[in-house]
Amino acid sequence: MIIEPRMRGFICLTAHPKGCEQNIINQINYIKSKGPINGPKKVLVIGSSTGFGLASRITSAFGSGAATIGVYFEKPPKEGKTASPGWYNTAAFETEAIKAGLYAKSINGDAFSNEIKAQTMELIKADLGQIDLVIYSLASPVRTNPNTGVLHRSTLKPIGQNFSNKTVDFHTGIVSEVSIEQANEEEIENTVAVMGGEDWEMWIDALKAENLLADGFTTVAYSYIGPAVTEAVYRKGTIGRAKDHLEATAFTISDKLADVNGKAYVSVNKALVTQASSAIPVIPLYISLLYKIMKEEGIHEGCIEQIQRLFKDRLYTGDAVPVDEKGRIRIDDWEMRDDVQARIVTLWKESTTENLPAAGDLTGYKKDFLNLFGFDVAGVDYQADANEMVEIPGLVAND
């Protein structure tokens, strides 16, 4: 079938298998070009099919030759209907990994559930014995607590006061004002339940109880802080409260890992175009300005560049992992440079629908958004017939 992007708001309803495949090959080639990393050898990535989780799996496998298990929740294809992009990403990654002689298997299901945790642990026991790295990179708006059965939904709201500021519709380029009502306590608690550290800790507790963590084990979860212009709706809002909980959980997990000489970290990463960030008011305008500046300065990074730098320059240097005063790894250091942020403050005040095409990088934003779904990828013939019925070679069937 000929597959074209079909948009509905901030979501693309289709994905292109060949475009996703080319994206994966490009990322693999980037990792290979940067040389080997003296990194992990047996890795579990929870939330492995897109974004930072996917980049972590690629970096582990093709940077340090690791065996990888990925856990994700993606929609398979049906005749005449494409899969979600993470499905095609995973299929392409596992195909390339197996070609390279690397172990690569995966489980598709709700990573919050006890059933998927149990299935993952059985796979580790059978195939790997123990693991030396767990990457926790889930990005879900809802979570059912497996112990209580309660369904929690996250919200994106400010805390303590209503919020108004500029935003941009990246489809149309129109800059406008957006207003968001402040969250109530229930909304704050639900967001923490979905996006905080509880499930991360449950995963590590479960793995440790089964003696599946190797000596010197490391686990990393991903977070974001961001600048002053977004903090009211992000870092000081409901999501920020959840990130505070996630970061506090790293210390709790580290204490529990003392007997295996293990450590838990939160890595604060750079703002990037994702399905989630595209739906957050204010963030698309900020990212379009940020991209313009960082590209001009020669310091722009996508997911794969960020994670390669995290592994090679932070986690696996052979020395102590450098952290900030709150114990966090700061791989957002280039984004948060004083000169970069000062320029954003100036451009933000001046941004209008008319001048944003010159002041920002809306074109780059749109391209990155389409790339998430396998569209607008160089070297792909989008007029050619594409087979939507792609299988994932390492997918373990659910019991």
Image (cartoon, grey):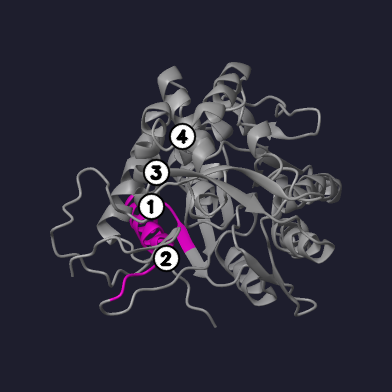
Which one is earlier in the sequence, the residue at label 4 or at label 3? 3
192 left or right, relative to 117: right
Residue located beneath label 2 in the image:
394
Mark 3 and mark 2 in contact (Cβ < 8 Å)? no
Amino acid type, residue under disc 3 in the picture: Gly
203 left or right, relative to 355: right
Front of the two marks 1 and 4: 4
**In the figure, residue 82 lies in which quadrant?**
bottom left
Residue 135 % position (x, y): 61, 50
Residue located beneath label 4 in the image:
352
Which residue does the image show at 57% across and 44% down from the upper left? 282
The part of the chain drawn in magenta is 81-105
Mark 3 and mark 4 in contact (Cβ < 8 Å)? no
Dot 4: element: loop
Amino acid type, residue under disc 4 in the picture: Thr
Quarter that holds the C terminus: bottom right
Which one is earlier in the sequence, the residue at label 2 or at label 1? 1
Question: Which residue is the extreme one toward the bottom?
Answer: 399
Q: Residues within 10 Å of mark 3 (few under 14, many from 20)?
A: some
Mark 1 and mark 2 in contact (Cβ < 8 Å)? yes
